[in-house]
Image: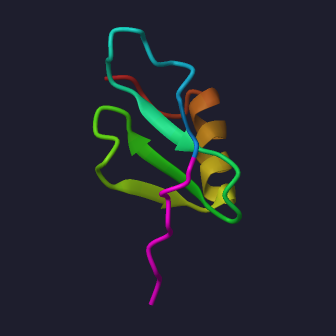
Amino acid sequence: MRSTPDLSTAHWRKSSYSNTNGGDCIEVADGLPGIVPVRDSKNPHGPALVFSPASWTSFIDAVKEEAFPFA
């Protein structure tokens, strides 16, 4: 069974694509061994999704390659 990581000391940074109007933003915590936590910046005390570094890198690469259609 997997345990929930302690993110109480995580240092979060906003996406470079975030606007200054408090729009749809995500935050990522760097420097945590073996995990990449991601959360909604509008709900900082809410849940975080936790990815492996390899999965997060694959996702970022796909975004950069515009692999996801825009609606």
Q: Which residue lies furthest to the top in this view?
A: 20
Choose between 4 and 50: the one closer to the eye.
Answer: 4
**Quick check: 46 above or below 51?**
above
- Residue 66 image position (x, y, % from top left): 56, 27
Q: In this view, does 26 lie above or below 19?
A: below
Quarter of the rendering occupied by the C terminus: top left
Range covered by the magenta-colored residues: 1-10
Q: Where is residue 59 in the image (x, y as percent from the top left)?
A: 58, 45
Residue 8: give x, y in percent of width and height.
48, 57
Kindly report the secondary structure that dominates the magenta region of the rendered protein: loop
Quadrant that contains the N terminus = bottom left
Residue in view at x 53 percent, y 27 percent: 15
Residue 47: x and y, percent?
Answer: 32, 55
Is residue 37 found left or right of 42 in the rendered image?
right
Image height of 38 relative to 5, above or below = above
Is residue 43 found inside the magenta-colored segment of the image? no
Give the total number of marks visible in the rendering: 0
In this picture the colour scheme is rainbow
Q: Is residue 69 left or right of residue 31?
A: left
3 and 61: which is toward the camera? 3
Q: Which residue ends up furthest to the bottom in the rendered image?
A: 1
- For the point 69% across and 58% down, the residue is 54
* Residue for point 55% across, 54% down: 9
Q: Which residue is drawn at 57% across and 20% down?
A: 16
Which quadrant of the structure image shows residue 51?
A: bottom right
Q: In this view, does 7 lie above or below 4?
A: above
